[in-house]
Image (cartoon, rainbow, N blue to C red):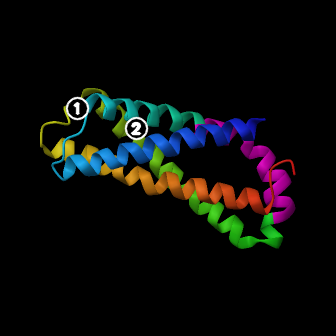
Amino acid sequence: MLMVVHGAAAVVLIGSTTHNGIMAVRQLWGRPIRPNLQKTYAAVLGWAFLITFGLGLLSYPEFRMSVRLAYLDESVPTGTLFFEIKEHWVGIGLVMLAGYWPMSRTIDIRERTADTVLYHVLGIAMVPIVWMAMWTGLIVTAIKPVGG
C-alpha cells in the first residue's frame, strides 16, 4: 500500500513540476501566464515533493533489504548504480526546493529581475530531476518490486 501511495504522490509531483516548468519557460520567453496558477503549481510541487520524498524514506528499509541487498547488488548492479544516482539528484532537488518553495510565496513573477530569472531557472531545473527519479523508480520496480 505504501508503494501505491508513493506512486500516486509521484504522479502529482510529475504533473505539477512539468506544468510549473512549462509556465517558467513561457515567462522567460516573455509569453503571458497566469501568476496565480503558477503559484498553485509551485505550492503543489512543494507539497508533492516532500510527500513523495517522505514516503520514499519510509519504504527505503524494505527496499534496501528485500530488493537491493537480496537481488540488485549482485544480479543487476547497474540498477543499483542508477538508483544511487537518482537518490543524489533527488537530494539536490530537495536543496533546490528549500530555496524555490519560499520564493514562490513572495516573488512577483511579472517583474523581470535577477530573482525572477533564478526562480524560473530553478523551476525548470526541477523538471528533469523529477522525471529522471520517476523513470528510475519505475525501472527498478519493474526489475524487482518491493515486497515482490
Q: Position of residue 141 (x, y in %)?
A: 74, 56
Name the amino acid, label 2. Ala
User: Which quadrant of the view contains residue 83?
Assistant: bottom right
Name the amino acid, label 1. Ile
From the viewer's perspective, is 20 left or right of 64? Answer: left
Q: In which quarter of the image is the N terminus?
A: top right
From the viewer's perspective, is 122 left or right of 80? Answer: left
- Counting every numbered tag in the picture gives 2
Q: Mark 1 points at which residue?
A: 107
In-front residue for pair 106/138: 138
From the viewer's perspective, is 137 left or right of 29? Answer: right
User: Which quadrant of the view contains residue 138?
Assistant: bottom right
Instruction: Estimate the spatial distance between the alpha carbons at disc 2 and disc 1, rounded to whole Å.
Output: 15 Å
Vertical position of residue 105 compared to residue 66: above or below: above
Residue drawn at x 40%, y 38% is: 98
Residue drawn at x 18%, y 47% is: 31
* Callout 1: SS: loop
Q: Name the residue under label 2.
A: 98
Dot 1, how many residues are within 10 Å of its Cα: few (below 14), some (14-19), or many (20+)? few
**Residue 61, magenta (yes or no):** yes
Along the polypeptide, which appears first: circle 2 or circle 1?
2
* Callout 2: SS: helix
**First to last magenta residue range:** 52-71
Instruction: Tell me if I can see residue 87 in this picture.
Output: no
Vertical position of residue 73 compared to residue 112: above or below: below
Residue drawn at x 24%, y 39% is: 33
Q: Where is residue 75 in the image (x, y as percent from the top left)?
A: 82, 72
What secondary structure is the stretch in magenta mostly built from?
helix
In-front residue for pair 82/21: 21
User: Which quadrant of the view contains residue 79?
Assistant: bottom right
Dot 2, how many residues are within 10 Å of its Cα: few (below 14), some (14-19), or many (20+)? few
Q: Where is residue 124 in the image (x, y as percent from the top left)?
A: 35, 52
